[in-house]
Amino acid sequence: MTTSASSFRQVPGRALLFAAFMLVASPAFAQSGPFAGMEGNWTGTGHILIKDGGSERIRCRASYKVESAGAGLHQILRCASDSYRFDLTTNVTASGNSISGSWSETSRNINGTVGGRVSGSDINALVEANGFSATFAMQTRGNRQTVAIRSQNTDLRGLDITLSR
């Protein structure tokens, strides 16, 4: 048998090994987007910042569904304090280092757009609606996540929460 004939016969075996490797490894590669690792239910506490300068302790629950190989995220965030409650739903998609999408807050019946940047596991975005805008910053480190939201010209100046799962 010549060397080229021997090499030719090894190609299907090598291709099969490569295909098997890709099938086994694909779940690791599939979750390579910026939202990879966020899937699941998170809970935590923090403070809601009120326009007059005060703050209230707040409790939150978040549910994340990750889609499109880690590049899509559906988030439901529910928070409540003694005086405030909000239900936020967000759908965002990442493309490279940019994110875009939509959000709605059902208890106040408002909705708008989200646009921002991703750097590693940090997200910085601007959320907007008619007459409203806020900055949104989220850092995820393993099973711990911090969220900071800041707004102007509303009764609520912001929100700082720490979530874990």
Image (cartoon, grey):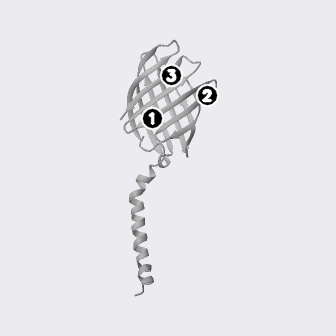
Number of other residues with Cα within 10 Å of mark 2, as a class: few under 14, some 14 to 19, many 20 or more: some
Q: Is residue 100 depicted above or below 79 in this figure?
A: below
Alpha-carbon span between mark 2 and mark 1: 23 Å
Number of other residues with Cα within 10 Å of mark 3, as a class: few under 14, some 14 to 19, many 20 or more: many
- Locate residue 147, reporting x and y percent: 46, 30
Quarter of the picture containing the C terminus is top left
Circle number at residue 129? 2
Relative depth, front residue between 74 and 142: 142
Determine the secondary structure under disc 3: strand
Relative depth, front residue between 121 and 100: 121
The residue type indicated by label 1 comes to Gln
Which numbered disc flags the more N-terminal residue, 1 or 3?
1
| Residue at image coords 43%, 74% | 12
| Residue at the spot of label 1 | 139
Badge 1 vs badge 3, beta-carbon distance below 8 Å: no
Q: Is residue 48 depicted above or below 68 in this figure?
A: above
Alpha-carbon span between mark 1 and mark 3: 16 Å
| Residue at the spot of label 3 | 158
Determine the secondary structure under disc 2: strand
Which numbered disc flags the more N-terminal residue, 3 or 2?
2
- Locate residue 164, reporting x and y percent: 37, 33
Alpha-carbon span between mark 3 and mark 2: 16 Å
- Locate residue 130, reporting x and y percent: 64, 26
